[in-house]
Image (tube, rainbow, N blue to C red):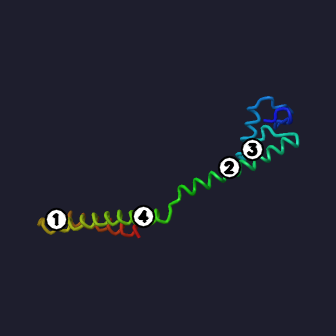
Amino acid sequence: MFNGHSSFVSSKGVSFDYGHLYTSFWLVMVTMMTIGYGDIYPQTHFGRFVCIIACLVGMLLVSTLVLALSSKLEFTADEARAYAKIKNLHSNDELRSKAAHVIVGALLLKREGGLMEKFAGRLLMLQRIRSLREENRSSH
């Protein structure tokens, strides 16, 4: 970026000129992302000024990105109402299905005459009633 105007110091205190453009890109990206590894840092006032500007621009870009993503991913009021309605319809369908299973179990229990079948039918009916109650509690 500003190859001839500033020199840098490594984290071990060794001064060097960053003769490669890649080194300046590395420093600017690390500064813009506010990571700050500390492997290189500017030694001159001009280089420090450039890093401060890079840090401010980086924070502005990251905050803009976060704001844009959060506004795009959030439901609007109409979408939230539609989602709640669909969820409610789905839970009502599941509730009706479970109630139908309970009724079928009760009819099978009434139709069956043997003791073992009655016990199995009652057990099945009780299990379905429990699952119906649990589903009803979880939907509220």
User: Where residue 134 appears, x then y in whole percent?
Assistant: 36, 67
Residue occupied by mark 3: 31
Q: Tag 1, which secondary structure?
A: helix
Mark closer to the chain start, 4 or 1: 4
Q: Amino acid at mark 3?
A: Thr
Task: Compute the Cα span from label 1 to label 3.
Answer: 73 Å
Mark closer to the chain start, 2 or 4: 2
Closer to the observer: label 3 or label 4?
4
Residue occupied by mark 2: 61
User: Where residue 127 appears, x then y in whole percent?
Assistant: 29, 64
Q: Tag 3, which secondary structure?
A: helix
- The answer to whether the residue labelled 4 contacts the one labelled 1, judged by CB atoms less than 8 Å apart, is no
User: Where residue 22 appears, x then y in whole percent?
Assistant: 73, 32
Q: Amino acid at mark 2?
A: Leu
Closer to the observer: label 4 or label 1?
4
81 w.r.t. 13: above or below: below
Q: Residues within 10 Å of mark 2 (few under 14, many from 20)?
A: some
Closer to the observer: label 3 or label 2?
2
Task: Compute the Cα span from label 2 to label 1.
Answer: 67 Å
State the residue in front, 17 or 3. Answer: 3
